[in-house]
Image (cartoon, grey):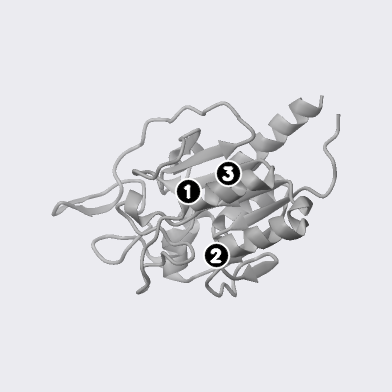
Amino acid sequence: MALPMGLRVLDLFSCSGGAGWGYHLAGFQVDGCDIVDRPRYPFPYHRGDALEYLAHLITTGEIARYTLVHASPPCQAGCALTVGTNQSQGWGRAHTDLVAATRDLLDQTGLPYVIEQPSGKAEIRKDVSLCGEMFGLDVLRHRNFELGRWATARPAHPRHRGYVRGYRHGVYREGPYVAAYGEGGGKATVPEMQQAMGITWTDVREELTEAIPPAYTRWIGTAFLTARQEAFA
């Protein structure tokens, strides 16, 4: 059975749109929301608190226009690296853990959803774990995804081809992957980060260091559509 038209994803804590672009490539219309002004975000965008906005959409019934909700809530307490969405920017704001509050609201939507977090101690189910090597990228950027109200097979994690280029514990190593975070010590330049992740619409270093490669959510979005089609068959 053919899928219905008008598939739309709500991209919460959207940052500059790495996740949103992947869903776009998978065939979704995308709307973003982030508390920080994101003039380079490539889709329709609401500036505001993501949880307040989601609660508003639930209360008004406007959430019904969406097929899927993606959220990348900040959880600094669960990760060694800064998680750069909404209030957890690493730009002078307090780091907060909004994972549980986000999940509570997502459950209220009644919609399928995705919660994305960096590898670390964030309390989400690791239903799917992705890294750049799965997609032939020159960045590793491991990410975990909790899937709500839908499921898909967990992909195999291939062996890495070598080191991430740069200094680690005072030792410099060459390698096929660039370090798409921080500055100095062999870290990637802005053009290298853009090339490695497939993100061309922003050249803001802070946005690139927080972004996930669109290949990840293209895979997630395609897996969701496949599961949906199988359910409709």
User: What residue type is disc 1 on?
Assistant: Ala
Callout 2 touching callout 1 (CB < 8 Å)? no
- Give the amino acid type for the residue marked by disc 3 in the picture: Val
Q: Are the residues tagged 1 and 3 within 8 Å (C-beta)?
A: no
Q: Which residue is mark 3?
A: 114
Write down the quadrant of residue 3 in the picture: top right
Mark 2–mark 1 Cα distance, whole angstroms, equals 23 Å
User: Residue drawn at (30%, 66%), measured in percent from left and top?
Assistant: 183
Residue furthest front in the image: 59
On screen, residue 222 above or below 106 = above
Which amino acid does the dot numbered 2 rest on? Ser
Which of the image's four quarters has the N terminus?
top right
Mark 1 nearby-residue class (10 Å; few <14, some 14–19, many ≥20): some
Q: Is residue 96 left or right of residue 183?
A: right
Quadrant in which the C terminus is drawn: top right
Q: Which mark is residue 112?
A: none
Judged from the image, the secondary structure of the residue bearing numbered disc 3 is: strand
Q: Is residue 33 above or below residue 168?
A: below
Tell which circle, 2 or 1, labels the residue nearer the N-terminal end: 2
Circle 3: is it few (<14), some (14-19), or many (20+) Cα within 10 Å?
many
Q: Can you say whether 44 is above or below 168 in the image?
A: below
Distance, label 1 to label 3, CA atoms, is 13 Å
Q: Report the residue marked by disc 1.
A: 100
Front-most of 216 and 89? 89
Q: Residue at x 54, y 46 (%)?
A: 103
The residue that disc 2 covers is 16
Q: Nearer the viewer, residue 176 or 17?
A: 17
Horizontally, residue 142 falls left or right of residue 169, namely right
Q: Which-is-in-front pick, marks 2 and 3?
A: 3
- The Cα–Cα distance between marks 2 and 3, rounded to whole angstroms, is 18 Å
The first of marks 2 and 3 along the sequence is: 2
